[in-house]
Amino acid sequence: QVQLQESGPGLVKPSQTLSLTCIVSGGSITSTNSAWSWIRQPPGKGLEWMVKIGYDGRPYYSPFFASRTSISRDTSANQFSLQLISVTPEDTAVYYCARHINWSIDYWGQGTQVTVSS
């Protein structure tokens, strides 16, 4: 059973950088054909895929977020991280990490609420 757990600050000030980490257990982030995503859901809106990193370390960015996001990983700690720069209140959302196998998501984290406010 793969488990994903998001961690990070619940409150970020406008213009700051949001950093979130997803800790993975029960499966390796380097497993062949796996990829690991960050997805968010703003209040009252649908899910928004932001970025993912493949098992080989290759990143894939949503064009909508590409200019403000970066993704990295720590294979020794089996975790991956999101950075979103220059946040605004519109970045308030529940942020999820998730695993893809052959492009389909099969596991999700429970999500973490991030509020952008001064």
Image (cartoon, rainbow, N blue to C red):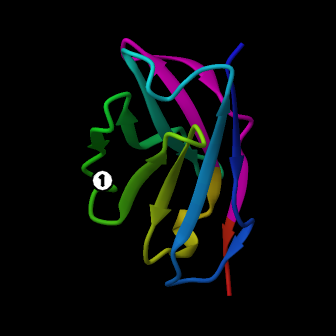
Q: Is residue 101 magenta?
A: yes
In the rendered image, the vertical position of residue 52 relative to residue 32, given as above or below: below
Seen from the viewer's position, the closer of residues 55 and 97 is 55
Which residue is rendered at x = 40% and y = 52% of the image?
71
- Other-residue count near label 1 (Cα within 10 Å), few / some / many at <14 / 14–19 / ≥20: few
Q: Quadrant of the N terminus?
A: top right
Disc 1 on helix, strand or loop? loop
The question of residue 34 being in magenta is answered with no
Residue name at image x 28 percent, y 40 percent: 60
Residue in the image at 68% along x and 88% along y: 118
Magenta part of the chain: 95-114
Nearer to me, 81 or 28: 28
Please tell me whether residue 23 is drawn above or below residue 20 in the rendered image: above
Q: Is residue 22 above or below residue 17?
A: above
* Residue 11 picture location, percent across and down: 72, 72
Residue 83: x and y in percent read 47, 62
Location of residue 113 (image quadrant): bottom right
Q: Which residue is mark 1?
A: 64
Please identify the quarter of the rendering in which residue 108 is found: top right
Residue 8 vertical position relative to residue 111 in the rendered view, above or below: below
